[in-house]
Image: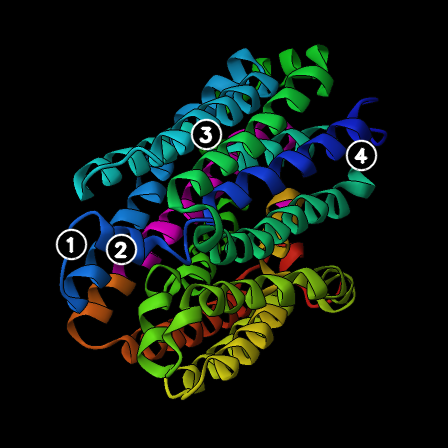
Amino acid sequence: MSESGSIYWRRNLAVCMIGAFSTTLGLTIMLPFLPLFVEQLGVTGHDAIVQWSGIAFSGTFLSAGLIAPLWGRLGDRFGRKAMLIRASLGLSVVICLLGFATNIYTLIVLLLLVGLAGGYGSGATILIAVQAPDKRSGWALGMIASSVMAGNLVGPLLGGWLPPLIGIPRTFWSAGVIIFVAFLLTWLFVVEDKKSTSKTKQKTSGGFGSFQGKSAVVYMLITGMFLMVANVSIEPIITVFISSIEHDQSHITQTAGMVMSAAALGSVLSASWLGKLADHIGHVRVIILGMIAAGVLLIPQAYVTAGWQLIVLRFLMGIALGGLLPCTSVVIKKIVPVEIIGLVMGYSVSAKFIGQFLGPFLGGIIGGNLGIQYVFIITSILMFIGAGFNMYVASKAKQRVYDCQK
């Protein structure tokens, strides 16, 4: 990539921010009412609802993680704008179809299709990573990440308030319409630099093993997976947890939505600040400190006695984790040659999707068999393991990006 980047990168960034926000909102709007929807579809019993909610939601990320490398290759071949159009149009259709689900098996199949159809945020990340100027790429990737976080903030809030007002099916249909608007904006206004795309295609034949420093990239892929597990491990079962600690059962979905949005709000507020801090003391050091802080904050979440306590703790945890995923992207960007940045970023996307699959899947299994409190405890242990892993890697790695200073 040249220092100046693509001449279209600013306009593309603006559209991709809107698209990443809209598609993330559509994916997260179901979180507060998913257990209730599972129950409406005929699943009975507390433990069964918890497990099926985790399985249903994690299926989205399983299929997304499996298909992401294919979409990345097709993006290199046919253009990344085509992949953004495919993702936004496909998501708008499938999410609308969720409103017509009649049993748990139909729901699971449709959520698998959501994962197969999706990938807008990851596609936007790859497009902007390739097009943005070198000196602005970290900031630009941070803006995409902030848009995703904002979608994570607004989606659960709408998911908590809309179903009591318009019903669950109409909530799905409303989300589909929002994503369709993102499709129209992407189709009409995103412009891809064809010369840059063809140049990248000619030079990607070396693949993942064709550059030095790939071990550091693998470390960042694992870190991204751990961070996603921490972010989403409780989301499909949070409504059940809130119902077990709140006496007033009339506002369960609203409280669950605020709990989920609290973490996203903290992340939105801290992302740019943590990014600037990382520029001064090192991106890996910020990742280590953030994971330790998140591990500490997860422990008291297992013992809260009211919804507002969980809201406060999730907000603080969001602050701790806010800039960490962009930090992993910046580290990858520094290591990987521009000729294969799209390919490697595709692997990064797959790793995060694996984390998004494992988080709710394990959360549902652990919560249904051991108790929801153990989901927080085990996730905390995972954060400490991740921090220790990065400390070890940072002490051994020779790459410049692992230095403490910029």
Residue where numbered disc 1 is placed: 43
**Amino acid type, mark 3:** Leu
Whole-Å distance between the Cαs marked 3 and 2?
A: 20 Å
**Which span is picked out in magenta?**
335-362
Q: Is residue 300 left or right of residue 134?
A: left
| Earlier sequence position, callout 2 versus callout 1 | 1
| Secondary-structure class at tag 4 | loop
**Amino acid type, mark 2:** Ser
| Earlier sequence position, callout 2 versus callout 4 | 2
Whole-Å distance between the Cαs marked 2 and 4?
A: 42 Å
Q: Is residue 208 left or right of residue 376?
A: right
- Residue 133 badge: 4
Residue where numbered disc 2 is placed: 53
Question: From the viewer's perspective, is residue 33 above or below residue 104?
Answer: below
Name the residue at 38% across, 40% down. 169
Q: Specify few, some or many for label 1: CA neighbours under 10 Å numbering under 14, 14-19, or 20 or more.
A: some
Whole-Å distance between the Cαs marked 1 and 4?
A: 51 Å
Name the residue at 48% across, 72% down. 387
- Residue 91 badge: 3
Question: From the viewer's perspective, is residue 38 above or below residue 249?
Answer: above
* Foreground pick, 303 / 69: 303
Q: Specify few, some or many for label 2: CA neighbours under 10 Å numbering under 14, 14-19, or 20 or more.
A: many
Name the residue at 38% across, 56% down. 33
Query: Is the stretch drawn in magenta largely helix, strand or loop?
Result: helix
Answer whether residue 30 is visible to the viewer in this image. Answer: yes
